[in-house]
Amino acid sequence: PGVTDSRVQAITFNWPARYGPSAGVDAPDRALWRDLSGRSTVMALQEAGWIAGYIRGRGWEVHRPNPGGDGDDQAVGNFLVWDPAVWREVSRGAFRLSPYTRIQEEAAGPTRHRPKYVIWAQLRNRADGTVWTFGSVHFVPSKHLGGAALALWEQQRDRMLEWFDRRGERTVVLGDFNAQVDDAPSAPIRAAARIQSRPSPGARAIDWLVRKRS
């Protein structure tokens, strides 16, 4: 009561390399970055590690840690970026959702999955002083839910909710929840997301921003 939130402009985007990391940033991606960064001050990016250097070079802060001790020697697959002219960092971290996991051989997609995390940063809005916590996630693909894959997806979902419980009211999670429209286990997330945010354009309704735990 009596508190007015900042106007938060946030975008989540799955941004795989078109031609591989060695190809650098091509013209369409440069144009897309200019468009998205012009309409947001915080972004969660998935599969976009190849472009991190370019983003940092545009003046944005990049949070993509390598927590260590999780059986993975690479930095986390998803990451969080923000405009330091708008946000001042208070703290940052990573909360593990699931370990390095092998699922059934007959799965329709990958059978090995890297550790998954909520990559988060607590940021203070320079204009009005409000403090927000932003998280970035990338769930296991739900398109091959079943058996061990389903258990892994649900573990990531439940661990994300545990993390939510430790945060304040101004908490936003952005990411690729891999919630395909015909997957019943993902229905609660999709139902909340329809109220809390807008889906990706077109048929790929899998990228969301969720404001409230419920």
Image (spheres, rainbow, N blue to C red):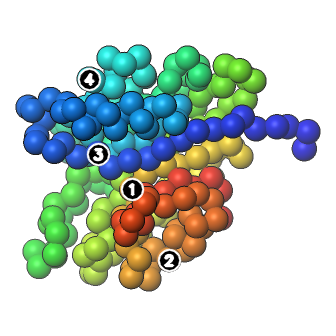
Name the secondary structure under disc 2: helix
**Residue closest to the eye, 184 or 182:** 182
Name the secondary structure under disc 1: strand
Label 2 to label 1, Cα distance in Å?
15 Å
Label 4 to label 1, Cα distance in Å?
21 Å
- Inspect this view and state whether residue 67 appears: no
- First of labels 2, 1 by sequence position: 1
- First of labels 2, 4 by sequence position: 4
The tag on residue 53 is 4
Dot 2: few (<14), some (14–19), or many (≥20) neighbours within 10 Å?
Answer: some
- First of labels 3, 4 by sequence position: 3
Measuring from the top left, give residue 155's x and y in whole percent: 40, 65
Name the secondary structure under disc 3: loop
Residue tagged 3: 15
- Inspect this view and state whether residue 188 appears: yes
Residue tagged 2: 187
Task: Name the amino acid type tagged 3.
Answer: Trp
Residue tagged 1: 176
